Image (spheres, rainbow, N blue to C red):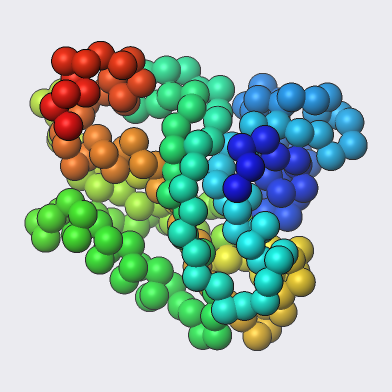
Amino acid sequence: GPEVEDEQHNFVALNIPAHHPARDPLDNFYLTDPDGENPRLLRSQTSTVQIRVMENGPPPVRIISTGRVYRPDEHDATHYSMFHQIEGLYVDRKVTLVDLKTTLFQFARAYFGEDAEVKLVPSYFPFTEPSAELYVKMTVRGRTDWIEIGGCGMVDPAVFDAVGYDPEQWTGFAFGLGIERIAMRKFNIPDIRWLFENDLRFLRQF
């Protein structure tokens, strides 16, 4: 999907209302006047691809999308203003939360190893209901803690309404995972900034 998006795809169709903090101009990279008509910005999530796919075809839908996203976060060991996400969307009849949990747990244990400790923690996202965050236990700078690597949930009926899907006929789940955080957990990288500094001493390890 495009990295330069409009508010319709980045917020409105994802059930994120105008007063939501995620739409604050200080928390986004707007390229045109945020008070103008359907302003453009650097996308803050790959969930925009979900909307574009559903707008252009009927269910069932099974997609994986990857790409860069942008948020004006202060740079530290686990945050960066540009990073990558991998997005998944599955829409069909009788898709349940059990399908979502099974998919993410199988992925985590296939990728991180059978002994990986993972959990879903209840959360809130306007475009999913119920919603959760996926946590993996990681050791960072000698300290072991739970690190959130992405959000997930069942697609909110309001999102289906926005793309013309009948929420009485279809259900689905979606997830978005931070690719850098997945790599950090797998390769025991303590600082996300190392991935963008182009230091050959670091990069040659991989």
Residue 130 in sight here: no
Relative placement, left or right, of 95 versus 162 is left
Q: Residue at x 46, y 59 (%)?
A: 64
In the displayed structure, would residue 169 be above or below residue 90? below
Q: Residue at x 60, y 58 (%)?
A: 50
Residue 49 in the image: state x and y as whole percent.
Answer: 60, 53
Residue 46 in sight here: yes
Residue 115 in the image: state x and y as whole percent.
Answer: 10, 56
Q: Quadrant of the C terminus?
A: top left
**Furthest residue toward right:** 37
Relative placement, left or right, of 193 versus 48 is left
Relative placement, left or right, of 10 versus 91 is right
**Residue 37 sits in quarter:** top right
Residue 3 in the image: state x and y as whole percent.
Answer: 61, 37
Q: How many marks?
A: 0
Q: Residue at x 77, y 48 (%)?
A: 8
In the displayed structure, would residue 138 be above or below residue 74? below
Q: Residue at x 71, y 75 (%)?
A: 165
Relative placement, left or right, of 66 versus 6 is left
**Residue 71 sits in quarter:** top right
**Residue 44 sits in quarter:** top right
In the displayed structure, would residue 43 be above or below residue 48? above
In front: 60, or 112?
60
In front: 160, or 58?
58
